[in-house]
Amino acid sequence: MTSTQLARGEGPDADAPSRPPRRSFLRTGPAVAAGLALPALPVTAPLAQTLAAERWAATWGTAPAGPPPSASTLGLSNQTLRLVVHASAAGSRVRIRVSNEMGSAPLNIGTARIALRSGGAGTVAGTDRQLLFGGQPSIAVPPGAPALSDPADLAIPAFADLAVSLYLPGASQATTIHNVALQTSYVSPAGDYSAAPGLPVQRTLASWPFLTEVDVSGGATAALVALGDSLTDGQASTANANRRWPDQFARRLQLQLGIAGNIGVANRGIAANSLLTDYATSLLAGRDALERFDRDVLATAGARWLLALIGINDIVYSAASNPIPADTLIAGHLQLLARARARGLAVIGATLLPFEGLSYYNAARENVRTRFNDWIRGAGAHDALADFDLALRDPARPTRLNPAYDSGDHLHPNDTGYQAMAQAVPLEVFAAA
């Protein structure tokens, strides 16, 4: 399959990707050693108290990927992006994380603003806030780097739609992007319309360029990170309706746990992503989960829980007659588990959904899925179990999705199926936190 197919959302998990040279998230050498040797700057008591008191949690998150094929890369020049995202948890202060991690040139942001969305490309009167970067209204984000804004005061209700506006004064290429947003966002004609209540719209987008996280403080203090592929990304769910399983689980948390359920949920699913392998046909499916784990899980503000639903693409894209061994998948998951536990995260194990009826299905691949699920259920390695397989399989034929939950491709659930997944995540591990 091709990158174009992935961009269209085709294939069992959209497609499988080619990669540029890997970037290291931690570099060593004399320069770093010299930096570590510098004396610490004094911190005033009021500032130290502020830093200690403010606790942040991701209310929304996505996983960056790219770059797209050059022929389909979005080019922007002297234009404003208005990116629409859906909060999971409430807070009284807000900040954003933007990313140029897949870029090869600086990303110049002239102005950044956030507001509650009223509908379409419009914002709610009185909620627009400018976001600064180190006290400055603009920033040049270097290639390969993210940037975190300064905080701004803004009351964000749970489940509010947010409009994040980025004015890009020069020529920019959207090389860092989340492809399957299932949410309409907007691009203006030429000009800085970041503060405009009603953004004039030149075109719409079904992706999220540059923006990777929205954090809150003064409310939620902890977050669940949902790491996965298209089954977490929400492929085949209704667009602009927030019916992915992490969205529906966030609502369930607050409905059933009340105030204690004001927990952020960051969706780090990428369509076509794998646990262990990067592919050669597209970069829009992201780096493998083991490679992106530190950035997409450990760097998430307030991360306290991890649910990793990942591995089905490793199975379906492996050789039909000699698929990936279940023990290899298990070893990869044990690494996710160890790295999460080393940072104090509770880990929820998740079984892989059935996929008979998909063109990639055969008995050898099904055997790998069955063995992996048996391990997840029986090993006792996790803090809790989300048995998605049991919740969504057809009781009369357990190797298939229940027809009531099948979107029609025999791998991805429909909205009702994603709701069943949200119901299958145990609440006890959150209530006990």
Image (cartoon, grey):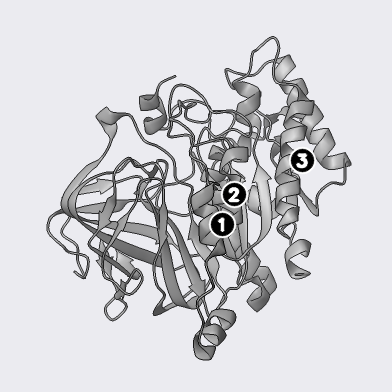
Q: Position of residue 334 (x, y in %)?
A: 77, 40
Q: Is 70 rendered above or below residue 309?
A: above
- Locate the N terminus and report the quarter of the image it occupies: top left
The residue identified by callout 2 is 294
The residue identified by callout 3 is 334
10 Å crowding of disc 1: few (<14), some (14-19), many (20+): few
Per the image, label 2 sits on a secondary structure element best described as: helix
| Residue nearer the viewer, 232 or 292 | 292
Q: Quick check: can you spot residue 133?
A: yes
Outermost residue toward the top in this view:
321
- Left or right: where 191 falls relative to 27: left
Q: Which tag is nearer the camera, tag 2 or tag 3? A: 2
* Contact, mark 2 vs mark 1 (Cβ under 8 Å): yes
Q: Quadrant of residue 406?
A: top right
What residue is drawn where x is 73% and y is 15%?
A: 364
Query: Mark 2 or mark 1, which has the lower sequence index?
Result: 2
* Contact, mark 2 vs mark 3 (Cβ under 8 Å): no
- Locate the C terminus and report the quarter of the image it occupies: bottom right
Q: Quadrant of residue 429?
A: bottom right
Amino acid on which the number 3 mark rests in the picture:
Leu
Amino acid on which the number 2 mark rests in the picture:
Asp
The residue identified by callout 1 is 299
Query: Mark 3 or mark 1, which has the lower sequence index?
Result: 1
